[in-house]
Amino acid sequence: MEFVKGGITAPRGFLASGIHCGIRKNKTKRDLALIFSRTPARAAAVYTTNLVKGAPITVTKDHLSNGMAQAIICNSGNANTCNANGVEVAKEMSRLVGEAMKVSHRDVLVASTGVIGQPLNLEPIASHMDELVHNLSSTGGKKAAEAIMTTDTKVKEIAVEFTVNGKVCRLGGIAKGSGMIHPNMATMLVFLTTDCAISSAMLQKALSTDVQNTFNMTSVDGDTSTNDMVIVMANGRAGNPEIIKEGHAFETFMKALNTVTVQLCRWIAADGEGATKLLECHVEGAADLDTAKTVAKSVICSSLTKAAMFGADANWGRVLCAIGYSGAEVDVSKVEVKFSSAKGEILVCENGAGVDFSEELAKKILLEKEIDILIHLHSGEEKATAWGCDLTYDYVKINGDYRT
Amino acid sequence: MEFVKGGITAPRGFLASGIHCGIRKNKTKRDLALIFSRTPARAAAVYTTNLVKGAPITVTKDHLSNGMAQAIICNSGNANTCNANGVEVAKEMSRLVGEAMKVSHRDVLVASTGVIGQPLNLEPIASHMDELVHNLSSTGGKKAAEAIMTTDTKVKEIAVEFTVNGKVCRLGGIAKGSGMIHPNMATMLVFLTTDCAISSAMLQKALSTDVQNTFNMTSVDGDTSTNDMVIVMANGRAGNPEIIKEGHAFETFMKALNTVTVQLCRWIAADGEGATKLLECHVEGAADLDTAKTVAKSVICSSLTKAAMFGADANWGRVLCAIGYSGAEVDVSKVEVKFSSAKGEILVCENGAGVDFSEELAKKILLEKEIDILIHLHSGEEKATAWGCDLTYDYVKINGDYRT
């Protein structure tokens, strides 16, 4: 497996474009993206568990009921959520693309991210559809990645190349998450493309399994958005025998998928609102997988732990506290905690109690931009990882700003 | 029922003192408190649900197994938690008080709050026991209240007077919570005294029932401390017939208890680390009580909602989001949200969607120091209230500060 350029347009047969249509006021900010497969593709998706779901989710779920899709249209600047006419607007977006690309509107998936509660005006989208379509290209991935961003500070695109049954396949992805200037919550959007041949059912299985260990283990501030969506399209152009069951080929595909999704999670977490550090919490030695995950997420979501990391403070007491209230059954007298980064590793808690350690070394380790919080529960063999970021003044500033 | 002065020494037969013994470096800060009942009292307590429990909890639970107590010793500055010798130290604190007051050490309850993971040195406590005992007085409640504070900015003491079976009774309380300069989590400690005559079993029942609607519905930052404890002592000196079962007298007692605990919750929440506002989330119209509580707590704990309140931003989308991910079964298409304060009330969301509202009026309402977030679920008759505070730069500063 190796990383290749091109992001979502790296796999064969995929085109993408990203333009500014006017939903966002800033003319230099792209706000409309289109991803298109030259041939119909198997598709699968996972959505937010928030009971409040953006209108795009309603339409996308409906259009995906047959496991097939050919395009994704996504706008930033308005989430099209909590508006009375939302579903109609989302449907119309799919019709506009369907007409322009000469495909059924039911093969068009819809996504939106941005302000909640303000109706989305279709005019900019309708009047720029020609430009959006005209700009489709096999190198348009980056522009699409830019167009889905809200106030992410970095473009997030990636692609890998791998071999299935002797055929070279590619899987690419773009993502946005965790950064908005206007007071609103973070929305995580991830679009994945592949030219690997795989059935809809196996594609859904791969995605649903993977997200449990990746996007569902990523937290910026604990507030689950109304618009989270991960979509994957597979158009089979690599020419491999279609993956229709578990086995070596499926495992290879899952590994490629996971390589892409883990990297996107790291970038999403690192670009969290106001974040200055990427935090990875690795839990080992758990009696079962649920325990490992529950503990990892609890630590990553702990406000006090996040604030301590911002302050480069080796405050293991807060980590232990987060483990203790996680809800998982843990023998706290066996818990071990270490902090680790490029500058080294340090043991700070053993058997649930403090140990002497060099504050100087701890500070050096924690001043890095990527920190690993290593927890060993000494009660079994299961592991889990969760991704997050530190809690900073800028998080408060971004989210507590007065609206004018 | 009426409020009276005296806090925990308002009920007859209770004495208290609070001194500086040296656990804290700042000589002007009291750090050791003693509460004493002239006669043995029925006692009950509730403790943190964190699996990591401070040593004081282990000892207090053991001493309370007979439902009786006569004293509470509490130090601030060191939580005596996660230390290998913690339990022994806590036991020794109870022995020192037992000797000095000539009561069994098993009638002495122990509490500590402060830094985790640093052994608690008994020397300052032992060498100041005489002074602590000498200072016991029937007006010492305030000094005890000061001595249990860490970086609370306000003393929290209260007392009410009520009548049970024709006898005048009093119930008082002191609390600390939610503020520590040294990087560490908030600990909530609440000590309640009453001269009402009530059996241990009914006292425990009253407390356990009450905390479900009060302290367990209060959150500053979602991090449940390792040392939370609520203790109540009842010495019967009011002379009423002992309350041994449910009925009118028990209800009156519960009402007095709740009047005190609700006020303490409000103060604890309002004094949350860095807080500038008290937030109360009132949920009505829930199908069942669990739903009402789950929703109220989810909103109060939402980082994005808390930040919005700091910014006086009428961001109902975040409130709706928190309701949606709360885990409670809610028909989001029926949800109504209003913001309210001394400056007025404003409807911002109806039937799960936005409504036009005056941003100017909303800003005026939200610039107040006490904000009510009113949620109506239009699905039943149950209600619940949760208390919290806004998320501010100072929260990050207090908890992200570099240790030297």
Image: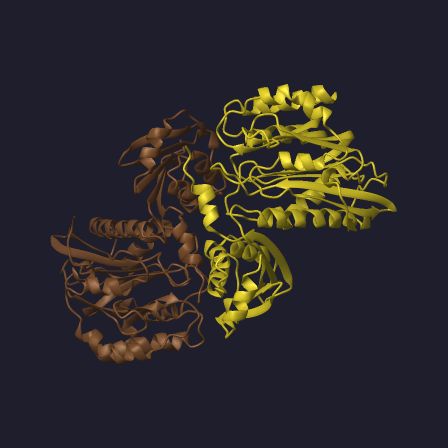
Chain colours: A yellow, B brown
Q: Could you say where residue B316 lies in the image, as x and y percent from the top left?
A: 43, 34
Say which of B27 and B49 sits in front: B27
In screen coordinates, is B14 left or right of A223? Answer: left
Question: What residue lies at 33% left-to-right and 50% top-to-bottom?
Answer: B269
Instruction: State which quadrant residue B62 falls in.
Output: bottom left
Q: Is B401 placed above or below B304 here?
A: below
The residue at the far front in this view is: A28
| Whole-percent x, y for residue B78 in the image | 36, 69
> Residue A302: x, y in percent?
48, 54
For the C terminus of chain A, the quadrant is top left
Q: Residue at the spot x=84%, y=44% of the render?
A: A168
- Placement of A377 over or under B4, stated as above or below: below
For the image, the number of numbered tags is 0
Residue A229 occupies quadrant: top right
Q: Nearer the viewer, residue B109 or B398?
A: B398
Q: In front: A381, or A361?
A: A361
- Residue A239 seen in the current view: yes
**Residue A322: where, in percent of width, then height?**
48, 58
